[in-house]
Amino acid sequence: LVGTLAGAAVVVSNDTGPLHLAGAVGASTVGLYWWPNVVTSAPRERRRHRVLVSETRVCPACGAPLRPPACAHEVSSIADIPVPAVIAAAEGLLAE
């Protein structure tokens, strides 16, 4: 996995282990983050990393706040990040 990530032109992922491994081995990344995680998890360096942030604050299914104690729905907290924004970020890194 690490060799594959290191050889990637750009890695697009949500805020998970593979995203952080890709950054650690030198790959350019587009990270999709839920707003509270940006402060603690997003890379500080932006030359080869792009950070896209979801502003979702309530469960899309029931409207309950997305904070403990959370509702029982298993829904994405980053689904509101527009696909064109993700593509543009990746293409921007590829162009550099």
Image: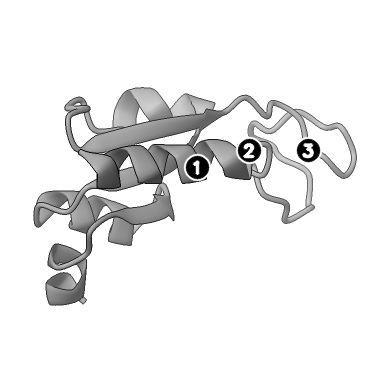
At 63% from the left and 38% from the top, the residue drawn is 82
- Residue 68 lies left or right of residue 58; in this view the side is left
The CA span between labels 3 and 2 is: 18 Å
At 20% from the left and 58% from the top, the residue drawn is 21
Residue 15 visible here: yes
Vertical comparison of 33 with 23: above or below: above
Q: Camera-side residue: 32 or 35?
A: 32
For label 1, the residue is 86
Q: Marks 1 and 3: in contact by CB < 8 Å?
A: no
Mark 2: secondary structure: loop
For label 2, the residue is 82
Please state the horizontal and vertical placement of residue 53, each as a whole percent of the image: 50, 29
Q: Earlier in the sequence, mark 3 or mark 2?
A: 3
Name the residue type under label 1. Val
Name, please, the residue furthest toward the front. Answer: 95
Name, please, the residue furthest toward the right. Answer: 62
For label 3, the residue is 59
Q: Marks 2 and 1: in contact by CB < 8 Å?
A: yes
Vertical comparison of 10 with 65: above or below: below
Query: On the rendered image, what quadrant is the N terminus found in?
Result: bottom left
At 64% from the left and 34% from the top, the residue drawn is 68
Name the residue type under label 2. Pro
**Residue depth check, mark 3 versus mark 1: number of the one nearer the observer:** 1
- Residue 74 lies left or right of residue 36; in this view the side is right
